[in-house]
Image (cartoon, rainbow, N blue to C red):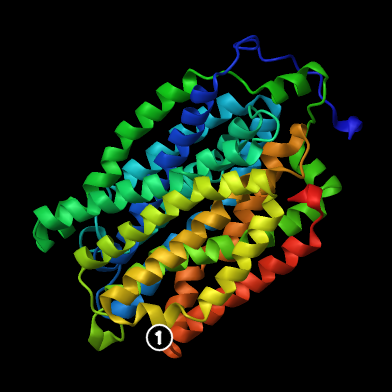
Amino acid sequence: MTDAISASPTPASNSAQVNSPARVLIASLVGTTIEFFDFYVYATAAVLVFPHLFFPASDSNAATLQSLVTFSIAFFARPIGAVVFGHFGDRIGRKATLVAALMTMGLSTVLIGMLPGYDAIGIAAPLLLALCRFGQGLGLGLGGEWGGAVLLATENAPPGKRSWYAMFPQLGAPIGFILSSGFFLILAETMSNEDFLDYGWRIPFIASLALVAVGLYVRLKIAETPEFRKAVEKHERVAVPIEVVFRGHLRSLILGTFIAVATFVLFYLMTVFTLSWGTTPLERGGLGYTREQFLVVQLVGVVFFGLTIPLSGWLSDLYSRRTILTLTTIAIAIFGFFYATLLTSGLTGAFLCSIIGLALMGFTYGPIGAALAAPFPTMVRYTGASMTFNLGGIFGASLAPYIATWLATHYSLDYVGYYLAASAVISLVCIRLSGREEV
C-alpha cells in the first residue's frame, strides 16, 4: 500500500486538541439523529403523501409502488456518497468531511419540502422529487455521514469499549425515528387531512434546517480523531482510498455487505413496508388502520429499538460482536416465520410484531457499526466502512419495501416473512465465514 502514500501535511487546526468522551459521543450522535430524522420523514411521506401529490392518481397501488421506487433511489446514490465522502474523510480528516456531509443533507431535505406537486407541474414533479432524493442519498442518505460518525466514536474509544462507543451513532436511528414519527403524529392530530396534504407534510422537511444548524455547531467544536492524526504523522494516508479497499480488502467488503443485509431488510420492512401495509384500506388487501393508529404502533416499537441498542453494545464488548450478531440473526430468521401471523392478529398483534421486530433491530444495529469498520486499517477505514454499509443498503434496503409490497399483493403477507428469513440466512452465512478479527 505504500506506493499510494501521500505526503500531504498534517491538518493544522485542532491537532493538539483532545476530545472529551461526552463531546465525542454527542457529536457522533447528533449528526446521525438529524440524518435519520430526514430519512424517516421522507420514508413516512413516501407512504402517506407522495403517492397522492407526486404521481398520477389513476391507480393508487401503482402510485404507492412508484413512490417507493423514489425511496429506493437514495440507496443507489449512497455508495457514490461513500466513495466521495470516504475519499475526503481518509484524505483530509473525519471532522471536515462530517461537516460537509451534514450541509449537503440539509439542502436536499429542505428542497423536498418546497416542491410543487404533480397537479401543478406535471411529470416534472416526480422527476424533481427523484433528483432531491438522489441528493439525500449522496450527502445525507448515510453515504457520507454514517461512516464518519462511527469512526469519530470508535477512533476515540478506550480499549475494550469500541462496541459501546460505536453504538452511540446508532442511537440516532430510534431518536430520529421518534422525532419524525412524532412530528407526523402531531400534524395528523392537529390538522385536517386536506390541510396535511396541502402544506402540513412540508413542515418537517423545512424544519430539519434548524436541526442541521445545531448539528453543525456541535461538529465544529470537535477535534480530529487521535487515530487519524497518528496516521497523518506516520505518512500513512493513501492517494486513492477506494482503490486500496478494492485491491487489498475486497473480501472484507463483500462479507461486510452481506452481513448487513438482514439488518437493512428487517428495518425497512418494520418501518416503511409495515406502515404502508398497515394503513392500506381493507378493500385493497391491507390492514385498514388509520395513520394515527399505526404511527403509535411504530413509535412503541421504536422505544424498544432504542433500548436494545445500548444493551447490544454492552453485550458485544462483554462477549463479542460476532456472538451477538450470530444469535440475533438466528432470531431474525425465526421471527420471519411469525411476522405475518403477528401483524394480522389485531392491534395487539401489530404492537407485538412492532416490539419484537424493532427490538431485534436494536440487537443487530448496535454492534454493526463497529463490526463493519473493524476489518479496515485507519488510512482507508472511512471509505471501507461507508462502502460496506451502503452496499448493504442497496442489497438489503433499497427495494425492500417495493419487494415486500409486491410479494404481499401477488402472494400473501407470509411471503414477506419468508423474504426476511432468507435475508437472515444470507447474513448468518457471511458472519460465520468472517474471522473473529473481521467482525
The residue nearer to you, when weighing 374 against 141, is 374
Which residue lies under the disc numbered 1? 409
| Residue 306 appears in the rendering | yes
Residue 271: image quadrant is bottom left
* On screen, residue 94 above or below 82: above
* On screen, residue 191 above or below 59: above
**Callout 1, which amino acid?**
Thr
Horizontal placement of 63 versus 312: left or right?
Answer: left
Outermost residue to the bottom:
411
Picture residue at 21% right of the left edge, 59% below the top: 120
The residue nearer to you, when weighing 364 against 316, is 316
Q: Position of residue 214 (x, y in %)?
A: 36, 27
> SS at mark 1?
helix
Q: Position of residue 376 (x, y in %)?
A: 76, 41
The residue nearer to you, when weighing 222 against 365, is 365
Horizontal placement of 140 versus 393: left or right?
Answer: left
Q: Position of residue 189 (x, y in %)?
A: 12, 56
